[in-house]
Amino acid sequence: MEPLVKLRGIVKRFPGVVANDRVDFKLRRGEVHALLGENGAGKTTLMNILYGLYQPNEGEIYVKGRKVRLRSPRDAIDLGIGMVHQNFRLIEPHTVLENIILGLREPGIRIDFERHAERIRLLAEKYGWRIDPWMRVWQLSAGEKQQVELLKILYRGADILILDEPTSVLTPHETRMLFKALRRMAGEGKGVIFITHKLGEVMEISDRVTVMRRGRVVVTKSTKETSPEELAYYMVGRSATLDFGGVEFAPGEVVAEVIDLEALSDKGVPALRKVSLAVRSGEILGIAGVSGNGQVELAEVIVGLRKATGGKVIISGIDATNKSTREIIELGVAYIPPESVRWGIIPEMRVVDNLFLKAYRYPPYSSKLILNWGRMFEKAEELVKEYEIVTPSVHAKARSLSGGNLQRLVLARELSGLIGEGIPKLIVAAYPTKGLDVRATNFVHKTLLRYRRLGAGILFISEDLDEIMMLSDRIAVMFEGRITGLLERGKADKEKLGLLMSETAPS
Amino acid sequence: MIEWLESALHLTVQMGTVYLLASLGEIYAERSGILNLGLEGMMIMGAALSFIFTLAYGHLAAIIASIAAGVLMSLILAVMAIRMRLNQVVTGLALTMLGLGLSGFLASPEIRRGILLTLNPNIPEKLLGIQQAPTLPEYPIPILSEIPLVGEAFFHHNPLVYASYAAAPLMWYILFKTRLGLSLRSVGEDPAAADSLGVNVFLVRYLATMISGGFAGLAGAYLFLGFQPFWNEGMTAGKGFIALSLVILSTWNPLRAILGAYLFGGIETLQFRLQLMGWKAQSPYFLAMLPYLVAIITLTLISLENVRKRIGVPASLGVPYSREE
């Protein structure tokens, strides 16, 4: 039978990188086809090409047997291709209805809202979803938003569905609902491409799997004939087991404590509701949860970037509530911000400048007025070696570094005790491995464990349960601004954490 | 007393129409994500060209020329803001400066004389030197204009005022009930989302910006022809900036813009009347400053994150869009 989609020899170059290197890919009717690979393996780029967002430099695209050129999403939509992006592309202040019918090509100028609303309701019911078309999108949960994204595609009659990491914002329960709906769609003869880096999901939902690594397709296999271990091997090109041996848990005194902490989100609604936690020296306290449940706000309040509206932050026994960031830095707090590429560095400044964004005002790097550049260059060279930062020189602009190297730069600045040459008392690390490749992720893990051994207290925020369970001595789970549970190492399993992370938790 | 009130209301609607026309267009630009701060410059160009073209060819040509001038200027803004992705505040203000300077230049006696002779070699000599032009004639609407108060206030005007009555609801309908309107609003909220559904973000933004330019030119033409037909340099006197604040006050809704426009028109009328009645309290400088003060306050307000959320500023207002990023 004719495949729905056939990609042949796709090449896509971006300045300095080949994101897709002679990629071949086939999607059959009625299958869920997982596209597996690490971040940066080229999965999303490939799918953006199939959706007309990027133009390939070389290669051919066949849809339903016909050779096509996709100049824009419009061309792709007209061929029955639909894509749900990783970050929802929904217009929050508009209604569900308006979001779904946007861009539909129909005769007439006026929109018949009632007729569309009825048809959308029927379509949603078919997949077991209860969605009110007149609701505004900002009123919906993440799972419902995703249903709207899918409805957008289905309403256009698409039979080629691309989902980019669709489960990253979902609770386990919502994920199960999604999988059920996807099965149903495949049963109707549609083809589903499921982009992911999670092996468990591949095994659970897909019929076939294609693994990508560094812009190339490594293998395409039937899911039944493979195993998670084999897929992991294809994904990273070597055995992926990590060694974290030799770290026993010997916590010291409390280095930081928050008591009944409350704060508002950017939108002005409560993001933290009476959060109480304590981090001890020599321990990693993991914060698990679906992102957007107050984790970032918690980190920001502790490091002084966000005002607490209630409660207390105590660092080394000193009340640091709503103190300035500088005072908090001087108490020995290091901060690895989420998306450090955006919030952690100044891209237009040099590597050396970025390394000393904090320490430049303290001796020995400056006297009262004058910066001691000689000392800074010397130290910067050392740090580049110690943290294995790949850069042409310390004079290079930070923007020329890759994501993994930027994260090493941030780690070097925050952790290596430039202020007073000590080690940080408290390290607040928010999603420190998000978007990094395996090597860089390993490096971050090892570095955090090293500082744990050295006696720092570490608040470690992550969405990745495997990572959290591997590194943390204790795991706190956040949901809607509250701590819904606090589990000791070894007592936490995914099932328990999953329950605590979602509204299905018994409370 | 009735007579006083009637003429005050009449003047209110006259003044308000300038604001209404200008803000209707601006609502479209801002709903699509483009902040057209060149409004003032486009209005004054409209006023200057309507002055010159009325003398040369008459009213209809003048109105067309003013609209064309606004559209052309907004096209410059569109290329800079949409294609070159420059800062919209800076480009908009630059266009305001350009309009203020260029209009003064074109309408200055010597240059104007040259332009008039080029446009119409048979123009009577006495028109070459005068500083004014005939106003648009008023056409009272039969029966309706007989209603006390309301008749004089709303149905005793020139055609451009009547056109503005029709334009506001029509533009509301297009914005909220049609495909084009939905595309336009979506592009201003989240261009990436609109793009991924095949809406041509760039085309929609160009279109909306040009609509705002056209309306600004028309507002300038109305200001001059309908209302104060004596040319003097910088005669818009900050009215463009008031219209900008009005857009925010109306929360980007063409129907609410009607209320706001007449409110601002009414305040201005009241000030005139009070001065005439001997209230010397306000110095003219204070009045001249007001529009800019209002503009500063409103611009500050819409740049505050939580205010933006609360009053529903188009989320991508002032943010350029590009696809491969």
Image (cartoon, coloured by chain):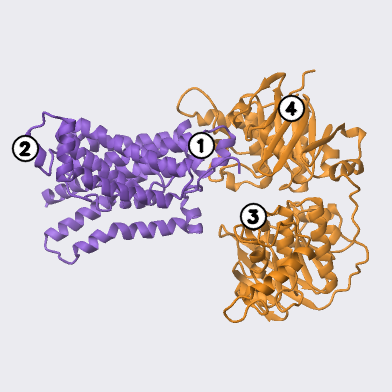
Circle 1 packing at 10 Å, graded few (<14), some (14-19), many (20+), is many
Label 2 residue SS: helix
Instruction: Quote the CA–CA distance across marks 1 and 4.
Output: 28 Å
Give the residue drawn at x 23%, y 60%: B287
For residue B111, side relative to residue B170 (left or right):
left
Three-letter code for the amino acid on which mark 4 is drawn: Leu
Q: Are marks 2 and 1 in one subunit?
A: yes
| Mark 2 to mark 4 CA distance (whole Å) | 75 Å
Question: Can residue A399 be seen from the camera position used here?
Answer: yes
Q: x, y percentage for residue A140?
A: 62, 46
Which residue is label 4 attached to?
Answer: A7
Do the dots labelled 1 and 4 sit on one chain?
no
Pinpoint the chain carrying mark 1. Answer: B
- B95 left or right of A42 in image: left
Q: Which residue is mark 1?
A: B201
Q: Which color has been applied to chain A in this rendered view? A: orange
Tell me: residue A360, above or below residue A109.
below
The three-letter amino acid code for the residue at tag 2 is Lys
Chain at tag 3: A
Tell me, for residue B126, which label it has, or none: 2
A490 or B324: nearer the eye? B324
Asked if both marks, 2 and 4, belong to the same chain, the answer given is: no
The Cα atoms of the two marked residues, 4 and 3, are separated by 33 Å
Residue A262: x percent and y percent? 64, 67
Identify the colour of chain B in the image: purple
Q: Which residue is mark 3?
A: A399
Q: Is residue A105 above or below residue A256?
A: above
Residue A479 appears at what percent x and percent y?
71, 57
In this image, B67 relative to A13: left or right?
Answer: left
Do callouts 2 and 4 mark residues in contact (Cβ within 8 Å)? no
